Image: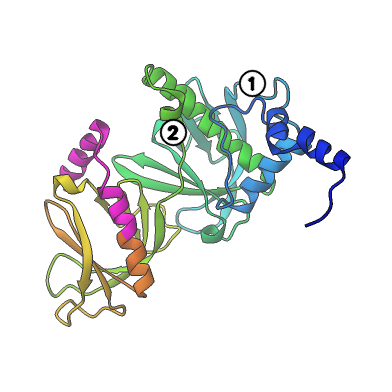
Amino acid sequence: MDHWEETQIQFLENHGNDVAKKIYEANVPVYYYKPTHKDCHVLREQWIRSKYERKEFVGKGISNISYGVKKGNLFKKGRDNGQYLSRLFILSEMDGTLKYFTRPDAKEPKAVIKVDSINASFQPEKMKQFNGLQITYIKDNRTRNIFLYHSDGQEIVSWFNAIRSAQYRYMQVAFPTASDNEIVRRLTRNFIKEGYMEKTGPKLNDGFKKRWFTLDNRRLMYFKDPLDAFAKGEVFLGSSENGYHVMAETISSSHGNPMWNYGISFSTPERTYLFSCETESEQESWIHAFKSVISQPMTLREYTIEAQFKRRP
C-alpha cells in the first residue's frame, strides 16, 4: 500500500530474488543440501552464511573442489555410558568409507562404515545438542546409530555435506546411467516419522511396552531409548500390492494392558503387528506415514532387502 518511487522499483528489478540467486547460488554443487523452512536452525543458518557471508557459491565457488578426504575430531556419544567424547573421524571418498578412531594414535579404526550404507540427519531436539548429527548405517544387516556433534556449526554442516559428496561420487560410479536428480534423491534423508508408541508381542496375552519408533524409508525400527545404538527390533515395510496393510485398530482388554488406546494394526505377509498411540492425532499421523511408504512400488534393491529381513532368525 506504500507509494514506491521509480528508483526503488528499478532497484528491486535489478536486485530481486531471482537475480540474487543467479549470483549467490551460481555454483552450488549438485550434492550440497539446500535446507527448507522445515530444517533445523544450524542447517538454515549455515546455508545463509555460506551464500552471503562466505560467498562459497559465487563465481567458481566450491563446485570444483573435491572433499576427497575429510579429517577431524567430533564428539561421539558412548554406546554404554552416554558420555560424549572426542573421536577422530576420517572420510575417504576414494575408499568410500567413514572411519573413526578412539585415539588419535590408534593404528586400527574402531569402525569402518561404507558411505553407501550411511544416512545422516540432524537431530538437535532428540539429542539435546544444538549441532547434533545422527549417523545411521547398516552393520551385519542391522541398523546401527551413532550420535555426533561439533561446537562449530560450520564444521558439522561441512561434515554433513562431505558425506553427501562422498555418496554422490560413489553412486556416480555404481550407477553410471542414473541422472543427477536420481542420485541426489538417494543421498542423506530425514526420517519419515519418529516418536513413541506402545508395542505388543506376537502372543495374544503379551503386554504392551513403550518404545521409541523411527520410520526410515522402508525400515521401521523400535528402541527402548531414542539414543540407543541398536534397535530392539526392525520391521520391513513392503508395498500394499505385496500384502502389506495398515489400519486403525480398537484395543481390547485381551491385548495385554496398554496405557494408550488409539491402536494401529500393521500387517505383513508373515504376521500382524499391533501398536497403540497416546492420542488420536498421533494415530492418524503414523497411519498416514505407513501408507505413504506402502503405497509406493518396491525397487529391485528393496526386494533384496526384504529377502534379507525374512532370512533373519
- In the displayed structure, 241 sits above or below 80; it is above
Q: How many marks?
A: 2
Which image quadrant is residue 73 in? top right
Between discs 2 and 1, the one toward the N terminus = 1
| Depth check, front residue: 210 or 195 | 195
Residue 62 is one of the magenta-drawn residues: no
Residue 293 is one of the magenta-drawn residues: yes
User: Residue 181 location in percent, x, y?
Assistant: 45, 28
Label 1 sits on what residue type?
A: Ile
The residue at which mark 2 appears reads as: 112
The residue at which mark 1 appears reads as: 65
Residue at screen point 71% across, 36% down: 51
Relative placement, left or right, of 6 versus 278 is right
Question: What are the residue bounds of the magenta stretch?
Answer: 288-313
Q: Element type at marker 1?
A: loop
Q: CA distance from mark 2 to mark 1?
A: 25 Å
Instruction: Assess disc 2: are there few (<14), some (14-19) or many (≥20) residues with their C-alpha within 10 Å of its C-alpha.
Output: some
Residue at screen point 18% across, 39% down: 307
**Magenta stretch mostly in which secondary structure?**
helix
Question: Which residue sits furthest bottom?
Answer: 253
Q: Quadrant of the N terminus?
A: bottom right
- In the displayed structure, 295 sits above or below 255; it is above
- In the displayed structure, 92 sits above or below 9; it is above
User: Residue 269 location in percent, x, y?
Assistant: 12, 51
Residue at screen point 57% across, 61% down: 128
**Residue 150 visible (yes or no):** no
Relative placement, left or right, of 59 versus 200 is right
User: Residue 198 location in percent, x, y?
Assistant: 30, 70
Instruction: Assess disc 1: are there few (<14), some (14-19) or many (≥20) residues with their C-alpha within 10 Å of its C-alpha.
Output: few
